[in-house]
Image (cartoon, helix red, strand yellow):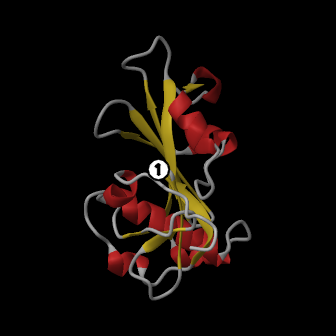
Amino acid sequence: MRDPTLYALTDHFRERLEQPGRYVSTRTVSDAIREGQLRWNNTDGWRFALVEGGVRFVVVVSDTETNSPVVVTGWTEVADRDAALAAPRWDGVDVDTIAVRAALSESASTPIPDRIRPRTVTRPFEVGEHRLETDPGEPFVRCTDCGCRFRSKEGITSRRCRQRSPGR
């Protein structure tokens, strides 16, 4: 169970590896499986959670619908903001990106303006088809491509990104 080579990567997970602002890699998946805390997942499968540099890496594995166990998904959460800001691996934008992404995912249908407002995300991260950023004081994330503003993950994922025409 602690051998990362036993787990295949799903297409869903491989797609997520490519997204800016995810901060999950095959190395962090292997580290979490080898060294992380093992938890039963609320749905099917197991979660491995590993904290490094103030950030928790969570890896979800399952073997319910496949011939061998698979890595279904993975994400990051800020476990200790001060430790994350002090770690050489992260800068303030990374820590705020992780915090905003996690907050959006915690309750996808709930608007979270107060959890977005104090954050600075100047390197866009992806959710659905949108590339998102925010400035301090803004109670929303904004798509850098289409200009739409969102306060919840459901709002982001329920609207297609229609890139703005030049000059708009």
Rendering quarter of residue 17: top right
Foreground residue, 72 or 11? 11
Rendering quarter of residue 62: top left
Element under disc 1: loop
Foreground residue, 133 or 99? 133
Q: Is residue 38 above or below residue 9?
A: below
Left or right of residue 64, residue 145 in this image: right
Quadrant the C terminus occupies: bottom right
- For the question of whether residue 70 can be seen, the reply is yes
Query: Could you tell me the amino acid type at mark 1?
Result: Gly
| Residue neighbourhood size for the residue with mark 1, other residues' Cα within 10 Å, grouped as few (<14), some (14–19), many (≥20) | some
Left or right of residue 108, residue 33 in this image: right
In the picture as drawn, the residue positioned furthest to the bottom comes out as: 137
In the picture as drawn, the residue positioned furthest to the top comes out as: 67
Q: Residue at x 49, y 56 (%)?
A: 162
Report x, y in % for residue 108. Answer: 31, 57
Q: In this figure, which residue is indicated by the disc labeled 1?
A: 128
Q: Is residue 161 above or below residue 71?
A: below
Left or right of residue 44, residue 16 in this image: right
Q: Is residue 144 above or below residue 59?
A: below
In the picture as drawn, the residue positioned furthest to the right comes out as: 88
Q: Is residue 76 above or below residue 46?
A: below
Q: Residue at x 34, y 77 (%)?
A: 113
